[in-house]
Image (cartoon, helix red, strand yellow):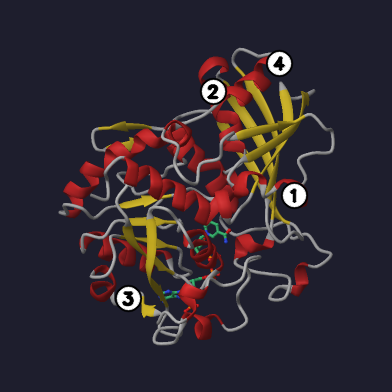
Amino acid sequence: MKEFHVGVVGATGMVGQRFISLLENHPWFRLVVVAASPRSAGKTYEEAIGNRWAMPAPMPEAVKKMIVMDASDVEAVVKKVDFVFCAVDMKKDEIKALEEAYAKAECPVISNNSAHRFTPDVPMIIPEINAAHAEIIPAQRKRLGTKRGFIAVKSNCSLQSYVPALHPLRADFGVTKSLVCTYQAISGAGKTFETWPEMIDNVIPFIGGEEGKSENEPLKIWGEVKDGEIVSAKSPSLTAQCLRVPCSDGHMAAVFVSFDRKPTIEQIKEKWASYSGEPQALNLPSAPKQFLHYFEEENRPQTKLDRNLENGMAVSIGRLRQDTQYDYKFVCLSHNTLRGAAGGGVLLAELLAAKGYFD
Ligand SMILES: NC(=O)c1ccc[n+]([C@@H]2O[C@H](COP(=O)([O-])OP(=O)(O)OC[C@H]3O[C@@H](n4cnc5c(N)ncnc54)[C@H](OP(=O)(O)O)[C@@H]3O)[C@@H](O)[C@H]2O)c1
């Protein structure tokens, strides 16, 4: 694979810092640009971060002295890079405009932001599940009037455990409905216990916009490419409650599910154990070897013990059992800033690189 030069837009944020960590020593992608708001622009990355570095590993030496660029200076950034990752905290219409400006300047954008998730010709991809949605990119390029530039997004972090768990069951057993309660870590809000002390010893039963994303985004992921658009699936019927819990990283979900053709517990476990997608077939650098791990122990998965499974890129599942209202219930877990954000973004970029979309 040829080496690609990449930029991170929003490099000083929680997700941006994850990108910086993951790109250190990446075999295909070399970090050459860090960009953020005018508040950080012109400072060294180290100065701009100040005491905000929240990653478990130290800040990579190579990035410390890089000068942070102003993300709105699109022309200057795109001169230096082959594509950008984008994770910014701005208003939705500002993000839409910024991402389109990069794409129209012929710079592909791999986005963690929600702004373009429901733009009909923007693929929202979990690489193991709907890699085929990348086929929409030529139609998007036609609309944008670009040769190389496009936007591809990853989905919300809340659903990165239960959509993978439900997916292998859909084709054979027909998932009809599912109820999900999520227990989401504070890094999902770009926060640590230092910056959000109110979360210590607390649960907050509200995360703005999260329940709508958790119910609607899966249907686009399970949708199909038709006439230059991605048409969302009509089923299953999904309902979600999303709670903020006092964990640093890792989103847990308690899931209830019913089927058209009710499988046995053994059939479900067999589907999970044998499931793999294009990242595994293509042997992408960030792909987990085993995407879905089932724990037989009755007290697993646990957020603290299991969120880092396979470098935080695998999904952990446990406690599958019969339910009295639905067919079954189970619990699942994924790392929100790795699989759910920057790691998922890097894996998506690897998939698109392997398929030639950055050439
Ligand atoms: N945290 C998660 O688990 C997670 C998961 C999935 C998706 N996301 C999404 O990823 C995005 C970033 O989240 P985060 O948690 O990393 O947020 P964050 O920690 O608040 O970081 C925000 C970033 O945006 C930059 N920024 C703010 N205003 C800007 C402007 N006007 N122009 C350019 N850059 C600007 C900030 O730069 P300065 O430092 O210069 O202000 C910073 O780099 C959000 O859209 C979020 O919904 C987050």
Q: Please identify the quarter of the rendering in which residue 101 is found.
A: bottom left
Which badge, 2 or 3, is on the more N-terminal residue? Answer: 3
Q: Please identify the quarter of the rendering in which residue 192 is found.
A: bottom right
Where does residue 230 sit, x and y in percent of width and height?
Answer: 34, 37
Where does residue 194 sit, x and y in percent of width and height?
Answer: 72, 75
Residue at image mark 1: 303
Q: Secondary structure at mark 1?
A: helix
Q: How many marks?
A: 4
* Local crowd size for mark 1, using a 10 Å CA cut-off: few (<14), some (14–19), many (≥20): many
Which badge, 3 or 1, is on the more N-terminal residue? Answer: 3
Q: Residue at x 61, y 53 (%)?
A: 336
C-alpha separation, residue under disc 2 versus residue under disc 3: 42 Å
Select label 4 or label 2 by which is in front. Answer: 4
Which badge, 4 or 2, is on the more N-terminal residue? Answer: 2
Please state which amino acid type lies under the numbered disc 1: Thr
Give the left or right position of residue 306, taking residue 344 as reference.
Answer: right
Which badge, 1 or 2, is on the more N-terminal residue? Answer: 2
